[in-house]
Image (cartoon, coloured by chain):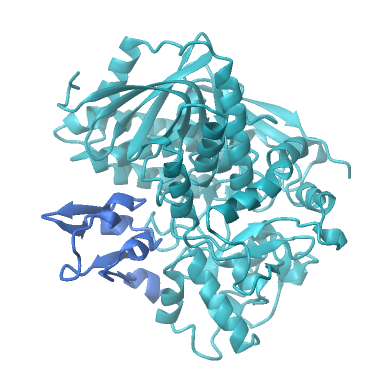
Amino acid sequence: MASIFGSDVHRLKADVAVIGGGTAGLNTALAAAEMGADVLVVDKAHIQRSGAIAGGIDHFFAYLETGPSWDTRDAYLGWVAKVARGAANLKIHEKVFCDELVPAMERTESMGVSLHQPDGSILRTQALGQPGPIAINFDGKFLKPKMAFAVKKKHIRTLNRVQVSNLYLHNGEFAGFAGYDIRNGDFYEIEAKAAVIATGNTNRMFKSQTGNPFNLWYCPANTGDLHRAAFDVGVELANVEYVRLTIVPKGFSAPGFNAFFGMGGKFVNGLGQQFMQNYHPMGDKAPRNMMVWGALQEVRAGRGPIYVDVRHLSAKDLTHLFSTLGIDKDTLPEFLRAKGYDREGTLIEMTVSEPMQARPSELCGSGIKIDETCASNVPGLFAAGDASDQMGCLHMCMAGGYAAGKHAARYAATVGHHRPLKAKALADERARVFAPLLRKTGLAAGEFETIVRIIATDHFGPYKSEISLTGAIAKLNGLDRYRDELKANNLHELMRCHEAMNIQSVAKIVAHAALARKESRFVPYHYRSDYPETDENCCGLVVVRKDGEAGIATRFERLHYDA
Amino acid sequence: MTAVIDKGKCNGCELCALYCPLDVIHMEDGIAVILYPEECWHCGACRQDCAHDAITFQFAPAMLGI
């Protein structure tokens, strides 16, 4: 059957569909296939190099039960309870991470990526408020391609370069989804008994430090496509009110924070003074949000810019630091050299990164609200990795992604027949998806997206109040009238049009969720200037769901901790 | 900010265009081309996958200058 644009329309079926083939998604696919399910992975990029660790990764958080009191499951969970309080559900954390940790580490090694150093030892460092040195430093430069190879070895079907555009239910249960190939325009209609959404967080929502929205810490291809689509079919989201920031090199929003401070770098201000002790008892090893908070306060007080001082490190440690930075971000060492930071006696200038819609801590997620089986509130729809409200970071995506695959496969086995997809809904979707290609004139996706970024940054990036959030919602709603004017000249631009609309939609959800949290938590990630204190009555999740055609409803779900 | 492809070294294997996570690299006349340089994430995947050292990185003035 030919599509209205001359490309083909494909109808596929699967037991378990995995949307998003990053770290979590590929672990999901492996698990579901090992359970005997017929699996289909759909990725907007290519699973070989898609997602947050496309170019590499250098650390894996794990307790190893080696003897010290900090190296136990209980100590780890104590850390989670402390630094992700109000966002991490410990019962879910135990199931999706702790119970899956050992096999996840074994799986990493079996893929041909060692968590050990060349001499066989395990190198561990401490930062980010950790109870001890629980960050395993390892060479994960080729972890993503090796993960993709493991998927290919199992003959798991994969659709690369397909952007999923909408999900469909039948009688309140998941039935399937639609999408299109961004390279050839083919349209896909996919029936699946279950789907696991693993498409990461939402980026490009806020202004970046150089003005280029692709110069980001997190993967700029993650644009909330499935947060928006899931929300539209009634899936609940949680932890989306948080606006995450980190510390990055000035000029290049690249990772490296954990390595800089884990290796003993000192965080200093424009006077050359260390300042973190003024903001947190752990000083330079404080949780990430407090490092950002400290930096913001120093700059605001006129003591900027901020730097990492590595002048005291030995030549051996410096060599290790620079090579580690290159594992996490392939191009970072040459950037630092181009700036002259390899010269002896040089301070490395840093800055607070762009804000992003993402988890408030390394130990939880932000997005689709999951239970202990990684299931959402819609039967048949599951989530894993950064796209879920309870998983994030490599360690949880490796472990929890696998858990999601097992549960989705078990669920799919209980579904007798694929639920039907409605022909009219699919025809309407095909027309909607390709509409920007048919317009002779119109608005470029980049222009629309820039407006969203200005609104989000001005109104909640990251400071916010009832007035600023209400204003943001009004402006973001006002942008709706331009959606039907978006114009694409080719399929690449068509993808960017849909991404821009999805970023706008998620920004509205973020603003509504932030409005409901009448306190401050994980400052500055959720800093309400009208409610600047943390309120123990608000220790839990703001859960967001669609209410009617245009409405957004919120409810509060309390989380409990022993201490 | 972008990856830069040396046309003289590119043998047209297509791996970089196949895998680029931001869809910025496409094939034109059998040679890989950076079609959307402003959308490069600098992840370095293309360079790692290139067997002919045809890819280098140039940092934009806004990255090096500030």
Q: Colour of chain A?
A: cyan
- Chain coloured blue in this rendering: B
Residue that appears at 67% across and 56% down? A61
Q: Is residue A229 visible?
A: yes
Q: Residue A134: x, y in percent?
A: 73, 61
Q: Answer above or below: position of A216 versus A19.
A: below
Q: Quadrant of the N terminus of chain A?
A: top left
Name the outermost residue toward the bottom.
A344
Does A13 sit left or right of A345 as displayed? left
Residue that appears at 62% across and 27% down? A375
Q: Residue A258: x, y in percent?
A: 62, 65
Q: Answer above or below: position of A526 versus A542.
A: below
Q: Give whichever of A341, A353 is nearer the camera.
A: A341
Q: Answer above or below: position of A166 versus B56.
A: above
Residue that appears at 63% across and 41% down? A400
Q: Answer above or below: position of A271 versus A142.
A: below
